[in-house]
Amino acid sequence: MGTKSTASVEHYCREVETYLCRKNDGHLIRVVGPSFELVAGWATKGIPLKVAFRGVDRYFERYYRTGPRRRPVRIDFCEADVLDVFDEWRRALGLSSQQTGERPGISLPEHLERVVLRLTEARAGGSLGAAFDGLVDRVAAELDIARGQPGGLRGHARRTLMARLSALDAELVELVRGALDDSTRESLEREADTELEPFRSTMHADAFTRARGALIERLARERLKLPTLSVV
């Protein structure tokens, strides 16, 4: 992976600072000193800005679930979420990564709650056509099944649900592909190439092609505000 110039690291840090300001309702929390070094480290690791933003979003979502915001959030608080999202991004694209310890088990009902909420919001916002309606209803049915299991899903029941989610996710991908026009697809391809540029020199051609296709898929979901149904 190539090193970033001082100017590009500075730009990266200022973009993160601006995004953090918006998330804090305009309250400016400067990315300076140790915070600057932290975020500069994200830049040199090749964490794309969009991935860093998703990590910040994840921290804020959890922060607000605990009640009203009590004080502005510093970027340092978001580090674990940014690194988690980056790890998920790399694994989803098939990029190598060093795992740092085991991840806690994922709560499938909680995952499905978020999935159903995002699908419902996307449908209400008019970004989905009628072809998506049946898929949304089937995911909601899976949520009802997961909720109805006393003590949560374990063993065979959990593996079966995860397999159904993977099948539904494959169906979602096909629907997303059909919803993209040529102009949108070309825009997503350019964006994917930009995000993957820091990794391109270290990847074999076939690995790069697979990662590029996976990232275009991921960007298309984001454009349509759609979640990943399967558990990554």
Image: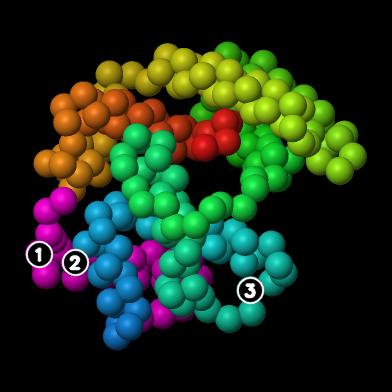
* Residue drawn at x 69%, y 72% as measured from the top left: 68
Determine whether 173 is above or below 199 in the image: above
Coordinates of residue 197 in the picture (x, y in percent): 17, 43
Q: Closer to us: mark 3 or mark 1?
A: 1
Q: Amino acid at mark 3?
A: Arg
Residue 45 in view of the camera: yes
Q: Which residue is mark 1?
A: 5
Q: Which residue is mark 2?
A: 9
**Looking at this view, is 72 or 124 the one in front?**
72
Question: Is 158 in the magenta?
Answer: no
Q: Amino acid at mark 1?
A: Ser
Determine whether 56 is above or below 98 in the image: below
The secondary structure type at the circle numbered 2 is helix
Q: Which residue is mark 3?
A: 69
Examine the image and state in which quarter residue 159 appears: top right
Q: CA distance from mark 1 to mark 2?
A: 6 Å
Highlighted range, magenta:
1-30
Q: Could you tell me if the residues under marks 3 and 1 are in contact, i.e. CB atoms within 8 Å?
A: no
Examine the image and state in which quarter residue 22 appears: bottom left
**Looking at this view, is 154 or 145 the one in front?**
154
Sequence-wise first label, 2 or 3 = 2
* Residue drawn at x 54%, y 53% as measured from the top left: 102
Residue 140 in view of the camera: no
Coordinates of residue 122 in the picture (x, y in percent): 57, 34
Q: Could you tell me if the residues under marks 1 and 2 are in contact, i.e. CB atoms within 8 Å?
A: yes
Examine the image and state in which quarter residue 176 appears: top left
Q: Is residue 232 left or right of residue 96?
A: right
Q: CA distance from mark 2 to mark 3?
A: 30 Å
Q: Closer to us: mark 2 or mark 3?
A: 2
**Looking at this view, is 143 or 150 the one in front?**
150
Q: Amino acid at mark 2?
A: Val
* Residue drawn at x 54%, y 63% as measured from the top left: 59
